[in-house]
């Protein structure tokens, strides 16, 4: 009996800690203006607000399940659990989906499909709570499984599309890519699902709280380290038009084609605009006197992305700097030259260098010395 009380006490402590974590994280994101984690990064305001709302309802989620810890009647526990499930389906689950959508900054996506998608689960939960009968649970579980599979397929498609958009619009992808985040989120959510569908018990209870704590910490870090790209966000119609333009770059007028090449050489290459960090295709287009759509089509005509074009110039700049340094017998490191060539992150440089030259930096430097 004493061991059971001890276990319950430890669980209540863990439950309270996770509740407090959600409340503090939500208040931090909503009320704090600055970024305590990465002061040089400005996170997307909508993502910050939606995540704060998610944390707030996650804390409330723990509040409305808390009576279960003290109820003795099995019927009362089941009713409280059913009501909690309905509230979760109306708040926590949709908000988590919205948070994930908000990480994709290439376009504004409608939110009403989320309400439509979770409506059957909410209605099923309400019926079960009113009738105090769980006969609908198998159908609800099956629908939830289908919904989960559908969301996975949808997000895989959207993340791939988002990655293509990034490479067409940005040279530096640091603090912009999110596919790693979605992979980790999927693992976390899969862990939750496994425990939700497993038998109730101490392992179930503790695992849910531990995973919840990890989710809070991860989301807080992810929100604060993701760059705001709202300046370059375009509408769905514009994105579709650009996709079509990329598929048929010959639609670009010949006079504009003839102008863009020399302008890129004059402004981007000779003036070394490619050394600027976080320069988007929109900013470059403005510098050379054209628009984003025309420049995007021009790169598609060349069979490259904006990211490949800028990084190609940066790699060539690195090679020139290295040859100058060796000729002058200067002692330099690849990290130093990479930074001078416009790369903020050495891993990004290494990946781009191998993709362009076919060799790692160390392999190329050894060959260059011989």
Image: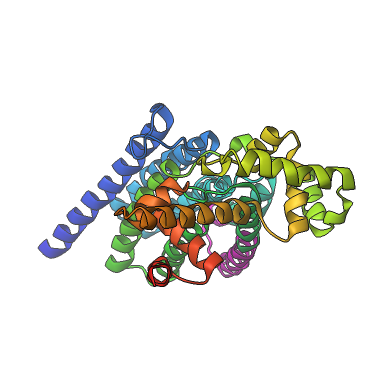
Q: As rendered, which of 206 and 213 lies closer to the eye?
A: 213
Question: Is residue 303 among what the camera can see?
Answer: yes
Q: Nearer the viewer, residue 148 or 287?
A: 287
Residue 133 lies in the magenta stretch: yes
Q: Nearer the viewer, residue 42 or 69?
A: 42
Residue at 57% from the left image edge and 49% from the top image edge: 171
In the rendered structure, the answer to whether residue 35 lies left or right of residue 292 reads left
Where does the magenta region start and end?
127-155
* Numbered marks: total: 0
Residue 235 seen from this side: no
Looking at the image, which residue sits at the far left? 2
**Looking at the magenta stretch, what is its main secondary structure?**
helix
Quadrant of the rendered image containing residue 288:
top right
Residue 206 falls left or right of residue 158: left
Q: How is the image coloured?
A: rainbow
Query: At which x and y percent is residue 211?
Result: 35, 59
Looking at the rendered image, the quarter that the C terminus falls into is bottom left
Up-down: is 64 above or below 185?
above
Question: Residue 209: x percent and y percent?
Answer: 32, 56
Residue 33 in the image, given as x and y percentages of width and height: 41, 27
Q: Which residue sits at x=75%, y=37%?
A: 291
- Queried whether the magenta region covers residue 226, the answer comes back as no
Toward the viewer: 43 or 81?
A: 43
């Amino acid at each position: 009996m004493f061991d059971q009380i001890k276990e319950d006490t430890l669980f209540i402590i863990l439950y309270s800690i996770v509740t407090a974590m959600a409340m503090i994280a939500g208040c931090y994101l909503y009320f704090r203006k600055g970024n305590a984690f990465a002061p040089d990064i400005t996170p997307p305001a909508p993502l910050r607000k939606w995540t704060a709302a998610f944390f707030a309802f996650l804390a409330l989620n723990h509040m409305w399940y808390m009576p279960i810890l003290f109820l003795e009647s099995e019927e009362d526990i089941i009713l409280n659990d059913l009501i909690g499930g309905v509230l979760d389906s109306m708040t926590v689950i949709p908000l988590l989906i919205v948070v994930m959508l908000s990480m994709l900054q290439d376009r504004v996506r409608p939110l009403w499909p989320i309400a439509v998608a979770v409506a059957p689960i909410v209605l099923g939960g309400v019926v079960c709570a009113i009738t105090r009968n769980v006969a609908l649970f198998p159908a609800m579980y099956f629908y939830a499984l289908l919904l989960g599979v559908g969301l996975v397929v949808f997000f895989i498609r959207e993340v791939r599309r988002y990655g293509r958009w990034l490479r067409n619009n940005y040279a530096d992808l640091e603090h912009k890519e999110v596919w790693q985040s979605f992979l980790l989120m999927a693992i976390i959510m899969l862990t939750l699902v496994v425990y939700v569908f497993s038998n109730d018990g101490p392992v179930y209870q503790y695992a849910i709280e531990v995973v919840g704590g990890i989710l809070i910490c991860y989301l807080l870090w992810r929100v604060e380290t993701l760059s705001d790209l709202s300046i370059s966000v375009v509408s769905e119609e514009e994105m579709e038009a650009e996709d079509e333009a990329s598929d048929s770059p010959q639609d670009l007028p010949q006079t504009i084609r003839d102008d863009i090449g020399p302008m890129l050489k004059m402004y981007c290459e000779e003036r070394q605009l490619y050394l600027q960090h976080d320069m988007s295709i929109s900013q470059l287009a403005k510098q050379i006197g054209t628009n984003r759509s025309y420049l995007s089509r021009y790169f598609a005509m060349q069979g490259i992305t904006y990211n490949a074009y800028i990084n190609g110039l940066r790699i060539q700049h690195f090679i020139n700097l290295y040859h100058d340094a060796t000729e002058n017998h200067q002692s330099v490191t690849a990290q130093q030259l990479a930074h001078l060539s416009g790369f903020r992150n050495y891993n990004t440089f290494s990946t781009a260098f191998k993709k362009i030259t076919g060799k790692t930096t160390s392999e190329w430097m050894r060959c260059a010395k011989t």
